[in-house]
Image (spheres, coloured by chain):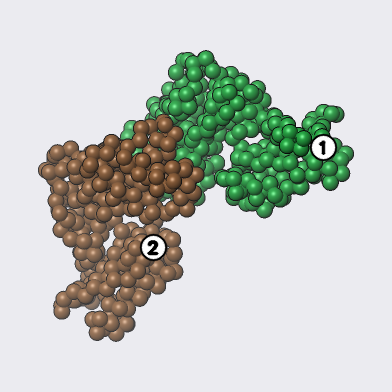
Chain colours: A brown, B green
Amino acid sequence: MDESFPYLIAIDGGGTRCRFAMTSPAGRIEVMLGSANVFSDRDAAVQTLVDGLGALAGRAGLPHSALSDIPVYAGLAGVTDAKVASEVADRLPSRIVEVEDDRRSAVVGALGTMNGSLLGVGTGSFLARQYNGEIRFIGGYGPLIGDEASGNWLGLQLVRRVLLAMDAIAPHSPLTRDISKRFSDDPAEIVRFSGVARPAEFAEFAPLIISAAKDADQVAVEIMQSGADYLVAGLRALGCAKDEPICAVGGVAPHYADYLPSEMREALIKPKGTAVDGALLLAGQLAERAKVEAE
Amino acid sequence: MDESFPYLIAIDGGGTRCRFAMTSPAGRIEVMLGSANVFSDRDAAVQTLVDGLGALAGRAGLPHSALSDIPVYAGLAGVTDAKVASEVADRLPSRIVEVEDDRRSAVVGALGTMNGSLLGVGTGSFLARQYNGEIRFIGGYGPLIGDEASGNWLGLQLVRRVLLAMDAIAPHSPLTRDISKRFSDDPAEIVRFSGVARPAEFAEFAPLIISAAKDADQVAVEIMQSGADYLVAGLRALGCAKDEPICAVGGVAPHYADYLPSEMREALIKPKGTAVDGALLLAGQLAERAKVEAE
């Protein structure tokens, strides 16, 4: 039997939105829906995925049953291990499907097939290096024990520095004074906030830190440099070579450019494409493998 | 009207147990019950407090109604502000009652009326200095943004160092290798553990760190020194004078002795008494104030 796949589907599922793309002989169709985190709410996430696939089929003028034979690559936030991935894959109306976390599609989207490294830094963080088609990941261990340099991490460092300054253990800066004032100069208000704030809320401090650091605020500069030091150490641990490109993706990563050593700053390139583009490339590879297996 | 108070009651209410003491002309009676955290479970905590007061009355051969006129000082874990304190106070069968968090009774128990400082470091942490009868507190902002040097903090630092070593960002030591092995050398297992572990579970790593540091494990020594640096900075911020005593109370605090500068190490003294002893002194002061107000 010879299978060929004129259609491919890619999903980039994140905590705030979920992007769906389908390529066909007639072109590319995209659909955007709300959040889909298979870790925090599995059923709702699967429903979003099924809805998005249905919407793609509808837009393409295909019957829902046609989805079964279209290869799907899904890079989803909250896929913590292979068991979760296969449980989600089993619930999709697709016969040829690969579900992973959302890091590989980010790397392949940004670098295509080039050798290079990726700094993925938004509310969370991870690092990756693609070399001769193999990708190695480090970091990304979540808001409590990992995600160094991330937006959440920046916010946490700032709040800690504000408390240390209030206690006269570390010096104040214009930024820490401003944050202290927002909490009525009352440590108990900061403790209350921190008891309920999610990582995305701590990450809302990131733009303030980035901007204050540009104005040479001492505390902000120290926090940014400390995040950058982690990223540099991570790139070195990945074996990032001098002539290889580095992509900085996510809301926070590009803002570390000024804090990197010059050879890394000069290696920064614009990403080739988005995570959805990466997921489409990976769907193509999945289709190739399915073809070979069918022959 | 002249009020005198032959009886006094003290409560030291913590996350793992709740101690009650009553002094009377006939001597001292003590009762111990389970945990009472008015933050995490208000109703259960109040019930424990009422039960303990009833038990004291029973042991002393007093009718339950007698409790109303006995001054009670309660230092309770989880009292985050004055509103919580007064809500708890209102639900006790006592007319003359003061409810606070559990830090003041620890200070007064350890130092009596002496000038001096306190390092309160167990699962959480705080610092205090008593000077001419006034107590100033710093730190103790909880497991996410504060509690530096605490058992929970030590455990978090260790887990982070293990992940950095697994990623080849920081060096391994015998301790980090041992912990890595406990998690099958799999970062995902550490992430899973950390997603559900409470501070007390992170604090279970503290004895391992303390012991490894004694054996000169490089990572353990760095973590202990970093905790000690916070405590030293805190003591200096409190204005701790050279000739003033320092008490180290809680399961972790005494283990920092070897990491303090020599003048602070030499200032360490054994606590005069426990937090219950402190609460009894504070109940006595409460009784004095009630007497003055009644006159």
Where does residue B85 sit, x and y in percent of width and height? 63, 46
Where does residue B145 sit, x and y in percent of width and height? 44, 42
> Label 1 is found on which chain of the structure?
B
| Labels 1 and 2 touching (C-beta < 8 A) | no
Is A18 or A25 nearer to us in this picture? A18
Q: Is residue B92 left or right of residue B60?
A: left
> Label 2 is found on which chain of the structure?
A
Above-or-below relation of B268 to A220 = above
On-image quarter of the C terminus of chain A: bottom left
Above-or-below relation of A113 to A214 = below
Q: Secondary structure at mark 2?
A: loop
Task: Bin the neighbour count of mark 2 within 10 Å (Cα to Cα): few under 14, some 14-19, many 20 and up.
Answer: many
**Residue occupying the point 40% across, 35% down:** A165
Where does residue A98 sit, x and y in percent of width and height? 31, 65
Q: CA distance from mark 1 to mark 2?
A: 68 Å
Q: Label 2 amino acid?
A: Asn
**Residue occupying the point 25% across, 42% down:** A213
Residue hosting label 2: A37
**Residue occupying the point 37% across, 71% down:** A48
Q: Is residue B40 visible?
A: yes
Q: Secondary structure at mark 1?
A: loop
Residue A67: quarter of image: bottom left
Where does residue A182 sit, x and y in percent of width and height? 40, 48
Residue B108: quarter of image: top right
Q: Which mark is residue B1?
A: 1
Q: Which mark is residue A155?
A: none
On-image quarter of the N terminus of chain A: bottom left
Q: Is residue B52 left or right of residue A291?
A: right
Is B118 or A11 nearer to us in this picture? B118
> Is disc 2 on the same chain as disc 1?
no
Q: Is residue B154 visible?
A: no
